Image: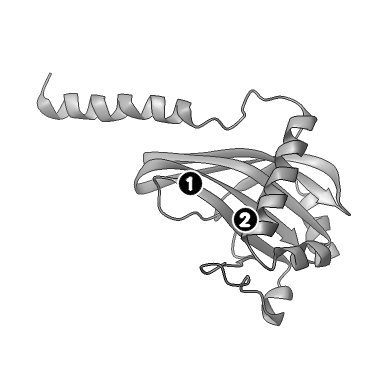
């Protein structure tokens, strides 16, 4: 075995335990567990990202993904499960799946919430067999403890995404290309 192939084997083999260590709740089962994670994520978001409480009040609905695990080594992927809340109540459960290719190595976990600011945006999401985040999503950014960067132009966007609670070895998180699909918990 050449030195390069041993190195490749060691790096590739080392990523398997890294992925296994990312407890994402794949076998967690049950609506109660997802709802409990969603409640905890919302509490964390409101405490850590000032301005999101106003978004919660103004949104027609919100999709909360309390734990998304992303890992990559050349090829990458992400997976998480969450709940769609309308009027404070869970109405559906969703999975988020993303894939990527490029210069990447590492793993991270994060939470995100999609705020549907119009009834039309919420209806389009709910009636879609599989909705993908793309150019129609506006990212609201929290800069070092300041109030969330939400102004009147952002509030006119149909979908606002807030990413929070990042931990791991990959820098940055984006929802571009993430596909959301309704699931049975």
**Which quarter shows the N terminus?**
top left
- Between residues 156 and 141, which one lies in front from this camera angle? 141
Horizontal and vertical percent position of residue 43: 71, 51
Q: Tell me the quarter of the picture where residue 80 sits.
A: top right
Q: Which of the pair 22/161 is nearer the observer?
A: 22
Q: Position of residue 115 (x, y in %)?
A: 73, 60
Residue in the image at 51% along x and 50% along y: 166
Please provide percent x and percent y for residue 152.
71, 81
The residue under label 1 is 167
Label 1 to label 2: alpha-carbon separation: 22 Å
Number of marks in the rendered image: 2
At 72% from the left and 51% from the top, the residue drawn is 42
Q: Quadrant of the C terminus?
A: top right
Label 2: state its secondary structure: loop
Dot 2 corresponds to which residue? 133
Q: Nearer the viewer, residue 111 or 135?
A: 111
Category of crowding for the residue at label 1, using alpha-carbon neighbours closer than 10 angstroms: few (below 14), some (14–19), many (at least 20): some
Quadrant assignment, res 51: bottom right
Between circles 1 and 2, the one closer to the viewer is 1
Q: Position of residue 88 (x, y in %)?
A: 86, 51
Q: Is residue 59 left or right of residue 152?
A: right
Q: Is residue 182 visible?
A: no
- Colouring style: one colour
Observer able to see residue 35: yes
Compared to residue 30, the image places residue 75 above or below, namely below
- The crowding category of the residue bearing disc 2, from other C-alpha atoms within 10 Å (few below 14, some 14 to 19, many at least 20), is some
Judging from the image, what secondary structure is the residue with disc 1 in? strand
Residue displayed at 73% across by 35% down:
34
Most distant residue in the left direction = 2
Q: Is residue 24 left or right of residue 94?
A: left
Q: Is residue 170 left or right of residue 91?
A: left
């Amino acid at each position: 075995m050449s030195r390069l192939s041993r190195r490749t084997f060691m790096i590739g083999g080392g990523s398997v335990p890294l992925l296994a260590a990312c407890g994402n709740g794949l076998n967690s089962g049950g609506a109660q567990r997802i709802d409990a994670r969603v409640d905890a994520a919302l509490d964390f978001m409101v405490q850590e990202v000032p301005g999101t409480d106003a978004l919660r009040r103004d949104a027609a609905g919100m999709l909360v993904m309390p734990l998304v695990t992303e890992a990559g080594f050349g090829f990458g992927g992400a997976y998480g499960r969450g709940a769609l809340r309308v009027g404070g109540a869970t109405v559906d459960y969703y999975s988020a799946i993303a894939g990527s290719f490029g210069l990447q190595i590492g793993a991270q976990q994060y939470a995100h919430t999609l705020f549907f600011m119009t009834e039309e945006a919420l209806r389009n999401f709910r009636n879609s067999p599989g909705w993908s985040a793309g150019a129609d999503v506006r990212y609201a950014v929290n800069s070092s403890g300041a109030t969330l960067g939400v102004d009147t132009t952002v509030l006119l966007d149909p979908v606002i995404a807030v990413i929070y609670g990042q931990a791991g070895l990959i820098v940055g998180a984006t929802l571009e290309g993430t596909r959301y699909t309704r699931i049975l918990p």
